[in-house]
Amino acid sequence: PPQPPQPTTTNLHVKSTTMSTSTTTTTSCDESGATTTITTTTTTSSIDAISGPSSAGAAGPTREGNFANPESSLGNDPRIDPAFLAHIMTAPEPVANMLAAKNTENPLEAATTQAERMELIAAVEQGYVGAFGFLISEVPMDGLVETTETIEGVDGNEITLYITKPVGDGPFPVVVHLHGGGMAILTAADAAYIAWRRRIAQRGAIAIGVEFRNAAGKLGPYKFPAGLNDCLAGVEWAHANRDKLGSTGQIVVCGESGGGNLSLATALKAKKEGKAVVSGVYAMCPYVAGPEYYDSAGKHAAELQSMAENDGIIMNVGMLNDMAKLYTEDTTNSLAWPLFATKDELTGMPPTVISVNECDPLRDEGKAMYRNLAAAGVKVSGKIVLGTPHAGEIMAQLACTTDTLDSLVSFARSLSPVV
């Protein structure tokens, strides 16, 4: 396979403005796929200025990602797990090189009308689906059964539920999976998510994928709260049909990126409406901050270090900002952007796991979400998946997902049923 470019080093000076400390669990994987989990105490800082080159010994956080090399990318960042990168490089050369290179492109930036934005985001969606298709191996159906259900949403719309179950009478915990894509693109029927649900079911849980409405792409355009309404409807169906499903009554809502946002927002919305249908939340690399953080002119711009540190490693922060604006113009609604949830809103949330990727621009908003939940008295745990970019477990399911999948299903089994 093509070899990624070798890194060069340029030091940047990062002015630190605030420091915070937390205890998290870190997970890494070696070339054989074996995982190691370590509990660590980490200190992070927010930033208000970047300049450089810096002199040796200058104040600032550890120089990693763009702070060590402004051209940091999936292909040259020394933090990336070799097994993960090797898996990416098995894709056809143009795809592998595209993923390995620094992502400096925001295709939505060129759009001058909403119609142009929708056309461009549709092309982005096709590109993601195609790239993932090269990276995801089909998961055998041995010992599994798949069915679909069509339910009616609160807006009179049809919602497809994709159900993957282990063979047998159970009972089994339920994992309702909400796919990624920034609440704007991708579908539960994509190959990556079919494989993910099957891997969950192989571990002894019922996996349900909700085909919610998106802000753009094939399932759009539907702005907030359309997709969120569909997600809660899917969870309510799983709860109402728990006996039919052969469920223990333990229902976890999980998802990555935009699905991480929707997982947290679904639990928040259920709590707000007095619906006891969620046992727990497992949010992976949650996309929860919104334009107030992603936009360089936003009120909280530059508060989260990882956005500068990891911008261009798979994800482009400018595009994250433009996709967020497709979802809603309301930049501080806590059901749209859960990082804005108040302590009172978070108090009483079900047990939650926040999992983030080390080399992800969104890493620090996930950590901030963890701290907000902890401050509200929620039973919450956090983990950092070392050596991976944004949603790395979904992209390279054969390389290093065993720990995350095992952790997800184990978490589901540990929870109290909702009755």
Image (spheres, grey):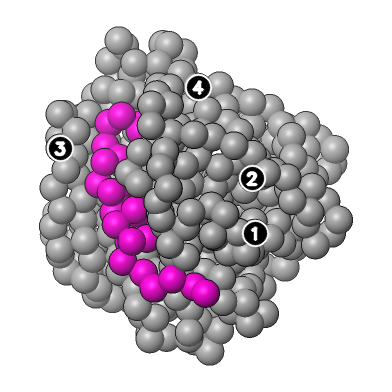
Magenta highlight on residue 407: yes
The quarter of the picture where residue 355 lies is: bottom left
Tell which circle, 2 or 1, labels the residue nearer the N-terminal end: 2
Q: Which of marks 4 and 2 is nearer the N terminus?
A: 4
**Amino acid on which the number 4 mark rests in the picture:** Gly
Closer-to-camera residue (272/94): 272
The amino acid on which the numbered mark 2 sits, given as a three-letter code, is Leu
Between 379 and 67, the one nearer to me in the picture: 379
Residue at left offset 28%, top offset 76%: 20
Residue 259 appears anywhere in the view: no
What's the distance in space between the residues labelled 3 and 4, CA to CA?
24 Å
Number of numbered discs visible in the structure rendering: 4
Answer with the quarter of the image where residue 22 lies. bottom left
Which range of residues does the magenta coloring cover? Answer: 393-419
Percent x, y of residue 181: 58, 43
Q: Nearer the viewer, mark 1 or mark 3?
A: 1
Q: Which residue, given by chain and number where applicable, does mark 4 sit on?
A: 133
Q: Mark 2 points at which residue?
A: 161
User: Horizontal and vertical percent for residue 235?
Assistant: 60, 60
Residues at marks 2 and 1, CA–CA distance in whole angstroms: 9 Å
Q: What residue is shown with label 3?
A: 34
| Residue 237's disc number | 1
* Neighbour tally class for label 1: few under 14, some 14-19, many 20 plus, Cα within 10 Å: some
> Which of disc 1 and disc 4 is earlier in sequence?
4
Q: Main secondary structure of the magenta part?
A: helix
- Sequence-wise, which precedes: disc 1 or disc 3? 3
Please check the rendered image and state whether residue 2 is part of the magenta-colored stretch, yes or no. Answer: no
